[in-house]
Amino acid sequence: MSTQQYRAKIHVTLRPSVLDPAGVAVQSGLKQLGYEGVDSVRIGKYIELTVAATDPEAARSQVDEMCDRLLANPTIENYSIEIA
């Protein structure tokens, strides 16, 4: 079976129960700039990569494993994957 290239788009965010100091700092900065209506800023990561796989499900499985092993910290982070 031949492989194809699949583009994976990954969004990694801290779990809601984890304090986000960078988000707090950005929220504070926005308020100092006069943006009073901004609440609950959360900062995350966006990762895009290309993976070779036999089908989209195999690509998603590979990327899911990559996230669990390196790209995200499953203890404190959530992630979502989009395969194109």
Image: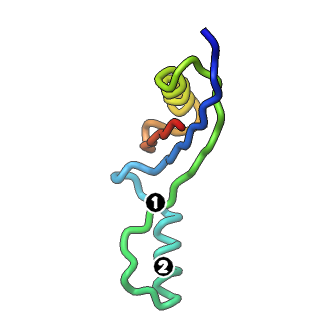
Name the quarter where the C terminus is drawn: top right
Label for residue 20?
Answer: 1
**x, y percent for residue 28:** 48, 79
**In this rendering, is residue 43 above or below 49?**
below
Name the quarter where the N terminus is drawn: top right
Q: Amino acid at mark 1?
A: Asp
**Residue positioned 48% across, 66% down in the render:** 23
**In this rendering, is residue 64 above or below 28?**
above
Of the image marks 1 and 2, the number of the one nearer the N terminus:
1
Q: Quadrant of residue 52?
A: top right
Q: Residue furthest top?
A: 1
**x, y percent for residue 11:** 50, 47
Q: Decide which of 47, 1 is in the foreground and name it.
A: 1
Horizontal relation, residue 43 to residue 17: left or right: right
**Residue positioned 46% across, 23% down in the render:** 57
Element at badge 2?
A: helix
**x, y percent for residue 81:** 48, 39
Q: Decide which of 21, 16 is in the foreground and name it.
A: 16
Horizontal relation, residue 3 to residue 68: left or right: right
Element at badge 1?
A: loop
Crowdedness of circle 1 by 10 Å Cα count: few (<14), some, many (20+)? some
Alpha-carbon span between mark 1 and mark 2? 12 Å
Crowdedness of circle 2 by 10 Å Cα count: few (<14), some, many (20+)? some
Q: Amino acid at mark 2?
A: Ser
Q: Decide which of 63, 35 is in the foreground and name it.
A: 63
Q: How many marks?
A: 2
**Residue positioned 60% across, 37% down in the render:** 7
**Residue positioned 45% across, 86% down in the render:** 35
Horizontal relation, residue 78 to residue 22: left or right: left
**In this rendering, is residue 74 above or below 61?**
below
- What residue is pinned by disc 2? 28
